[in-house]
Image (cartoon, rainbow, N blue to C red):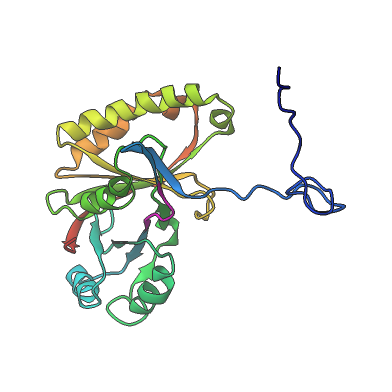
């Protein structure tokens, strides 16, 4: 009868366990930062890139159409909104998979007119990145195509943008408890989306937001009231009523210019 194989730790030439420097602690495992989706064709979906989106708000604008003309001339994909609560308020929404775009391309565009004479409103600045939860059937669509379609759809000119921050208690819940809470929240959003009443863009802004928020949400649609109604409906969910520490400020407006995809 043959003996069962014995198990031993791999060692390097110095006799130290593999992965552990001589005289030192084990080397830390390098994290996998790629976005992951559901298996497709038997293979896991992985993408090590995502879409960054930014909303910049201004006031003091007398000609919002000029902003769209400037963005079109610079071949920048995005949206120009007019603020419903400020007769001279505007905002621009831009996006790119390379965050360097916001410094190398967008920043120089904002120095001369028609942007130079505007007054920035940094309290409404929002920036985040698309993300996956691990079960998305089409990772490319989740991370890139759907957010762009939603933002740039000319049939959905109205927009409500806001940040939110979850409480630490949510992070202490088990994965199953978190998913049940998110499903309750998501069911409302899907119902509004199925009726073409409201469509959302969800961005992770942890480490990117000046006020330490966790997420940025954009609600878009053909009319304003359903966007307000979906926020009202979600106030009753466990996530909003029990596990949020802050919500807003809200920036509300209507698109005056959208680029083509």
**Is residue 240 on the magenta stretch?**
no
Residue drawn 27% across and 78% down? Answer: 114
194 vs 39, left or right, is left
Position of the C terminus, as image quadrant, is bottom left
Q: Residue furthest front?
A: 1
Locate residue 59, reporting x and y percent.
32, 65
Residue drawn 19% across and 57% down? Answer: 255
Q: Which residue lies furthest to the right in this view?
A: 23
Position of the N terminus, as image quadrant, is top right
221 vs 34, left or right, is left
Magenta-tinted stretch: 46-52
Q: Closest to the observer: 236 or 59?
A: 236
Locate residue 243, reporting x and y percent.
50, 29
Locate residue 5, reporting x and y percent.
71, 27
Locate residue 112, reporting x and y percent.
33, 82
Question: Does residue 250 show up?
Answer: no
Number of marks drawn = 0
**Is residue 50 on the magenta stretch?**
yes
Residue drawn 27% across and 47% down? Answer: 141
Residue drawn 44% across and 61% down? Answer: 122
User: From the viewer's perspective, is residue 129 above or below residue 164?
Assistant: below
For residue 191, what is the image quadrant? top left
244 vs 182, left or right, is right
Question: Does residue 254 show up?
Answer: yes
Q: Residue furthest left?
A: 155
For residue 258, what is the image quadrant? bottom left
Q: Closest to the observer: 208 or 211?
A: 208
């Amino acid at each position: 009868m043959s003996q069962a194989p014995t198990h031993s730790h791999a060692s390097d030439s110095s006799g130290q366990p593999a992965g552990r420097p001589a005289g030192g602690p084990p080397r830390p495992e390098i994290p996998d930062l790629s976005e992951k989706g559901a298996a497709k064709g038997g293979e896991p979906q992985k993408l090590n890139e995502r879409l960054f989106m930014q909303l910049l708000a201004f006031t003091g604008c007398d000609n919002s159409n000029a902003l769209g003309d400037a963005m079109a001339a610079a071949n920048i994909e995005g949206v120009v909104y007019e603020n419903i609560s400020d007769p001279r308020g505007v905002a621009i929404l831009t996006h790119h998979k390379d965050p360097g775009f916001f410094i190398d391309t967008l920043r120089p565009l904002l120095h001369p007119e028609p942007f130079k004479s505007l007054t920035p409103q940094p309290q409404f600045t929002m920036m985040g990145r698309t993300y996956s939860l691990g079960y998305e059937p089409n990772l490319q669509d989740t991370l890139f195509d759907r957010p762009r379609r939603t933002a740039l759809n000319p049939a959905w000119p109205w927009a409500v943008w806001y940040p939110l921050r979850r409480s630490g208690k949510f992070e202490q819940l088990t994965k199953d408890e978190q998913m049940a809470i998110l499903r309750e929240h998501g069911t409302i959003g899907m119902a509004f989306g199925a009726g073409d009443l409201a469509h959302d863009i969800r961005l992770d802004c942890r480490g990117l937001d000046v006020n330490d928020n966790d997420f940025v949400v954009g609600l878009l649609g053909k009319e304003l009231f359903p966007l307000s109604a979906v926020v009202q409906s979600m106030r009753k969910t466990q996530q909003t009523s029990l596990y949020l520490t802050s919500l807003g400020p809200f920036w509300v407006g209507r698109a005056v210019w959208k680029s083509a995809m």
